[in-house]
Image: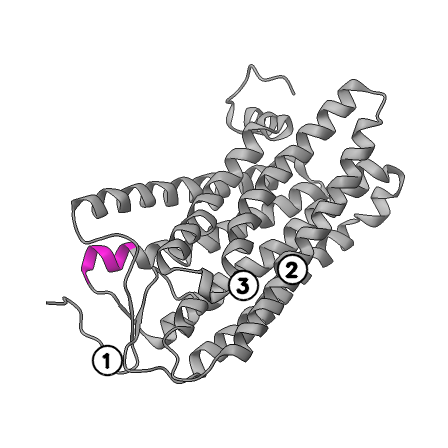
Amino acid sequence: MEKWIQSSSDFILLGLFPQNLTGLLLLLLIILVFSLALFGNSTMIHLIRVDPRLHTPMYFLLSQLSLMDMIYISSTVPKMAFNFLSGQKSISLLDCGVQSFFFLTMAGSEGLLLASMAYDRFVAICLPLHYPIRMSKMMCLKMIIGSWILGSINSLAHTVYALHIPYCQSRSINHFFCDVPAMLLLACMDTWVYEYVVFVSTSLFLLLPFLGITASYGRVLFAVFHMRSKEGKKKAFSTCSTHLTVVTFYYAPFVYTYLRPRSLRSPAGDKTLAVFYTILTPMLNPVIYSLRNKEVLGAMTRVFGIFSSTKT
């Protein structure tokens, strides 16, 4: 017998783990990852805020990435944990819309922000004399605001559509959050036009920025290999490899999930990939940017008094 009561407008989130001891242990692991993500990203934001040496465009963009990651993971994990622990898997139409809006906003905004970070590194390494003009505080602010606004507009359009299409009698979403493609499987109408819109939207917010990032870092790596200074080459390569690692972790599962035809997708596969880009990536980003960045390690030494043996 099911333990939840569903109203006519509620959805049912089937969740990620089975309701047994194994599922509980896996959930506790997810909660640990969630806690580490919040701690790591909030620490990164604090370091960038209080350390004057990190008051540069690159780190202002990084602070926004940390903020997006915190909202990103908070839009899915708390509800998933509550549903599992309480046994109440229902989610109201309004809550589903709110969750979908924040998830899609962070997904689109983060893709654009990563493209801005790639452009920042391209200008800094390939056009250093133009850097103060092309990456001024005003330009950096425009990039940040633009990422948030465009991501919000795109998210609002998808969320409004998903909440206004007719759904069949079954309202069981085979996912651990209100993912729009998973919701479309329950629609009582042909959604091929909207699925095409999703493909176009994914291309605009994920594929095109990814191509821009690839082109930027291609130019950067070409410039790095032609540097005469070994120290400058090492620093530039370290910074770019860090950014590329984050980009790969973010884009690869996202593009693979949303650009595949429905016939090649499975609910189990989509949920597994979703764990990677909604839960693991927000936890890994601050780790990657801190452990592989001497400036961040130096800021930790100055602010918290740790890693005192690290040379900055």
Q: What residue type is labelled 2?
A: Ser
Q: Which of marks 2 and 3 is nearer the N terminus?
A: 3
Residue picked out by circle 3:
105
| Secondary structure type for disc 2 | helix
Camera-near label (1 vs 2) is: 1
Which mark identifies residue 7?
1
Asked whether 295 or 128 is in front, the reply is: 128
Q: How is the image coloured?
A: one colour
Work out whether mark 3 precedes mark 1 in sequence or the reverse, and give the earlier one.
1
Mark 1: secondary structure: loop
Quadrant in which residue 118 is drawn: top right
| Residue 121 makes an appearance in the image | no
Where residue 165 appears, as percent x and y from the top left, is 43, 83
In the picture, measured across the screen, residue 228 lies left or right of residue 53, that is right
Query: Would you call the spot at circle 2 few (<14 residues within 10 Å), some (14-19), or many (20 or more)?
Result: many
Where does the magenta region start and end? 81-87
